[in-house]
Amino acid sequence: MIVRPRPSTLDLLIAMRGSVVPVIAPRLLVILTVSCLVVWLRHFAPGYFAGISPAPFTLLGIAVPIFLGFRNNACYDRWWEGRKQWGALVAESRNLLRDITTLLPEDTAQRRRCAHRVVAFAHALRNQLRDSGDGQSRDWLPAGGWARLSARRNRPGAILQDQAAEFTTLLRAGALSDILYHMLSERLTAMTGIQAACERLRASPMPFAYSLLLHRTVWLFCLLLPFGIVGSLGLATPILTTVLAYAFLGLDALGEDLEEPFSLSQNGLPLDALVRNIEIAAAEVLDEPPPAPLTPVHFILL
């Protein structure tokens, strides 16, 4: 996620970090080249462009931003839903950590083991959503705990199952009352719901046909626009065409980024930083030295 101070007017014009310009620069170069070729052709064969009216492009230029707006709103809803789910995970993790250190029996090793499982769950869920390695999850699990979990497809769910099994053992031994067990079980249920919501977002992208149709329409508009306005703008045609292409192609590229909220793109959610917040919470309730919060690197927080 892009995290940077509010830019000045000059920074807004020249800032490249966090901008979509590096992503769409090759596409803008194609549009600029086509526009220059159209201007060059009109100079040597003006008769071919005499009957082309800019009116159809005006109508299409009104419709394309509306379609882009609908798609970007839907993509932003996905991004914001992912952020809300991970915010809820941080809150539920802190609640469960508090309950572990106040409601479980006076057993330091057991409290530490259960608290570390909360952190392991956050790492496992992050890794599952990003298809990354599980080394950090392994580091937070009890000795020998990873050997059994490594063969499971749903590793976050398996960690919560182990947590629930330990709470159940305490209940059956009489070390935990029914009410306290129910409170702890509700925390695990909430974390399972958050996992399911994140999996739903990851497994249900925007309909491909819709994205493909909009992408093709934007490209057709940008490539055909020079033919419609070269008669009235002349040498200024490449400038206006490139500016409009920057707006339309930029919105299209931004929508692609927001559509995948858990990706490692510059607009993806900072899952590493959110997991680190849970690590800090676990260390503090266990009276251990907390790790330092993650900070942005070149304005990008992962």
Image (spheres, helix red, strand yellow):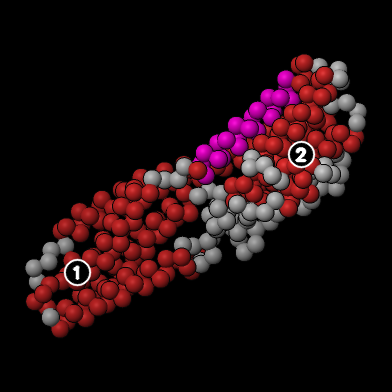
Q: Which residue is mark 1?
A: 227
Give residue 281's quadrant in the image. top right
Question: Residue flagged by tag 2: what amino acid is it?
Answer: Arg
Give residue 237's quadrant in the image. bottom left
Q: Is residue 184 above or below residue 251?
A: above
Q: Is residue 89 above or below residue 171?
A: below
- Say what secondary structure mark 2 lies in: helix
Q: Is residue 294 magenta?
A: no
In the displayed structure image, the side of residue 301 where residue 63 appears, left or right: left
In this view, the mark in front (1 or 2)? 2
Residue displayed at 90% across by 35% down: 108
The image shows residue 220 at horizontal and vertical percentages of 26, 61
Neighbourhood count class around disc 1 (C-alpha, 10 Å): few under 14, some 14–19, many 20 upward: many
Quadrant of the image for the C terminus? bottom right
Q: Is the C-beta separation of discs 1 and 2 under 8 Å?
A: no
- Say what secondary structure mark 1 lies in: helix
Question: Residue flagged by tag 1: what amino acid is it?
Answer: Phe
Q: Label for residue 117?
A: 2
Residue displayed at 70% across by 51% down: 134
Q: Is residue 300 visible?
A: yes
The image shows residue 188 at horizontal and vertical percentages of 69, 29
